[in-house]
Structure formats: C-alpha cells, structure tokens
Image (cartoon, rainbow, N blue to C red):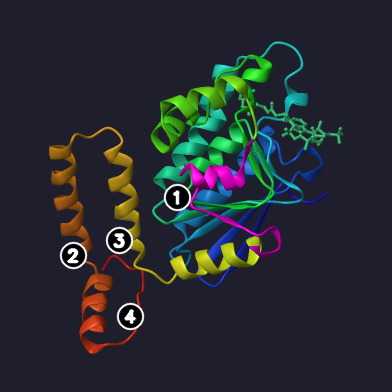
Amino acid sequence: MEPSVLVDRRGGWVRLVLNRPDRLNSFNEEMHERLAAALDAAGADEACRAVLLTGAGRGFCAGQDLSDRVGPADLGATIEAFYNPLVRRIRALKKPVVCAVNGVAAGAGANIALACDIVVAARSAKFIQAFSKIGLVPDSGGTFFLPRLIGDARARALAMLAEPLPAEKAEAWGLIWKVLDDAALATEAEKLVAHLATQPTVGLALTKQAFAASATNDLDAQLDLERDLQRKAGSTPDYAEGVRAFLDKRAPNFTGRSS
Ligand code: T3D
C-alpha cells in the first residue's frame, strides 16, 4: 500500500503529497503522523529551503475522515493532538510553505491550506467550510484566518452556509494568492517553490514571524518587532550578498544560511 503522505525531495525543496485519493485525502491519524514527521524533517533539513503541500487525485483534502467518527469521540482531544499541532507546525516552520490546492478543500482541509504562506489553486478547485453541515465549528484556524483574509461578513456566511467557494472567487476575495489553469497548477507551483528555495531563507522566516505577530500586535509593538527582526536579517550573509549583488548589477547567490 502506498504511504498516505508522499515525500519527494527536490533540489533545495520538498514536495509533500496527501495521498488518500479514494477518500479525497481526508485525514486519519496515520496521515496526521506522517505529515507531522515530514514537516519536522523538512524543518530540520538545512538543504530544504521551501515546502510544497498538495494532494493526490481529484481533491486536495476533505478534512477529517468521517468514517473514523462513527460513535462518540472527544473531538477536542483530536483537535489538540493532531489539527492544532499541524497548523502550528506549518506556521512555525522557518521556511516558506506553498499550498497547491489541486481540487476540493473541505473542512479542516480548507483551513490547513489557508495556514500555508502562499496558496495557489486549480481553477476547478473549491473551498468549503463543511463543518456546519455536520454540526461542527470551523477548526484548524478557520475562525482566525477567514475573517482576517476576507472580512467578517464573508467569513461568517461561508462558515454558516458551508457553500462551496470556487477558486476564482477565492482569489478575487483575497483568500488565496492565485488561480492557475488545472493543467498548469503542478508545474507553476513547483516553479514557485523552486524559486523560493533560492531566496534568502532566514529573511523569509523572519518575514513569516512578523506577519504571524501582526495578527495580534498593535502598531507600536509591530514596529518594535520589525526593528528586532531587521537587526537579525541584517546580520545574515544573504543580506550582505543581496546588497553586493545589487551594486555589482548581477543576480544574487543566496545560501539561506544564518551565518
Ligand atoms: O473529528 C475531529 O477530529 C474533529 C476535526 C474535524 C475536522 C474536519 O475536517 S470536520 C469536516 C469533515 N469533512 C467534511 O465534512 C467533508 C465531507 N466531504 C464532502 O462533503 C464531500 O466529499 C466534498 C464536498 C468534499 C466532495 O464532494 P464530491 O461529490 O466531489 O465527492 P464525494 O463523492 O462526496 O467523495 C468522494 C469519496 O470520498 C466518497 O467515497 P466513495 O463513495 O467514492 O467511496 C466519499 O465518501 C469520500 N470522502 C469525501 N470526504 C470524506 C470522505 N470519506 C471520509 N471522510 C471524508 N471527510
């Protein structure tokens, strides 16, 4: 049997593919564990400077595998054990995570995509806050990401109505970065992540940190944080190389190293 997460190491980056296509890549515990291990390995691997997350088959991810939810279950416990750590892992990873939403993204699957740094989607893809259909609350950061990305009115309606949001509308609303033709999605997403893997990795990690903090900081706190992060970014070899390359009128050769 194929693993539920395929890990494909490329030059400078890794592609992680959710791989339970007959269940639209919905999560069981085994897939959670494999994805967590793959993200941790990507984080620990200095040679890996960016991550691509996508799905096998016609869907990206349909959230929790509901066939594991027949009978009583403590959903708070599974959120605590699996979904919350997954969102935290993606947000804390010190390298950019690109999500290529290749098809339907429903329930936690939609919100895990939104936890990623850059989201591209196939034109045929759709995002569904499916939770209300089964009496649940949006989880995996949905109630955090949605109002911040698209505003409270749209967020509430998506959550309460569970209507599919087509990828083109998701782009128009600012929920995602870009829609791509279905046939181009994989290639374009790979080009994007390969490009990110050649960029100043530490600077990008600090950028990620700054955006994460801006959700709760006031302007003063954010200005102070930017000062501190810029101090760190300014001490990296990639900053020195970026300035030298600019002055030399040549392309920079970033290493992604912190010293
Ligand atoms: O439980 C906890 O730990 C708490 C955490 C919860 C997080 C959550 O994500 S809760 C939300 C769970 N997800 C859903 O409610 C979505 C359920 N799926 C759907 O509503 C639909 O499948 C879609 C709208 C996503 C796609 O519809 P469609 O018509 O394109 O496909 P389909 O025919 O419904 O699905 C294809 C197959 O995948 C089908 O199996 P079959 O009939 O071919 O054998 C279907 O049962 C299976 N599938 C799809 N989603 C799930 C699933 N099987 C198990 N769990 C799923 N979530």
Answer with the quadrant where ligand 1 appears in the image: top right
Q: What residue is at 51 percent from the left and 69 percent from the top?
A: 194
Residue holding disc 2: 234
Question: Horizontal and vertical percent for residue 209?
Answer: 31, 47
Q: Which mark is residue 181?
A: none
Magenta stretch bounds: 165-184
Mark 2 and mark 1 lie on one chain; the one further toward the N terminus is 1
> Is the C-beta of the residue carrying label 3 under 8 Å from the nearest atom of ligand 1?
no
**Is residue 208 left or right of 55 when viewed as pictured?**
left
Circle 2 sits in a helix, a strand or a loop, which is it?
helix
Residue pictured at 36% horizontal, 63% vertical: 201
The residue identified by callout 3 is: 203
Mark 2 and mark 4: span between their CA atoms?
16 Å
Secondary element type, mark 4: loop
Q: Which residue is mark 4?
A: 252
In what element is the residue under mark 3? helix
Q: Is mark 2 within 8 Å of ligand 1?
A: no
* Extreme residue toward the top, this view: 72
Q: Can you give x and y, in whole percent of width and height, for residue 90 in the image?
A: 47, 45
* Residue 174, percent from left and from top: 46, 44
- How far, Cα to Cα, is label 4 from label 1? 23 Å
Residue at mark 1:
117
Disc 1 element: loop
Q: CA distance from mark 2 to mark 3?
A: 9 Å
Quadrant placement of the C terminus: bottom left
Which of the two labelled residues, at mark 4 and mark 3, occupies the earlier sequence position?
A: 3
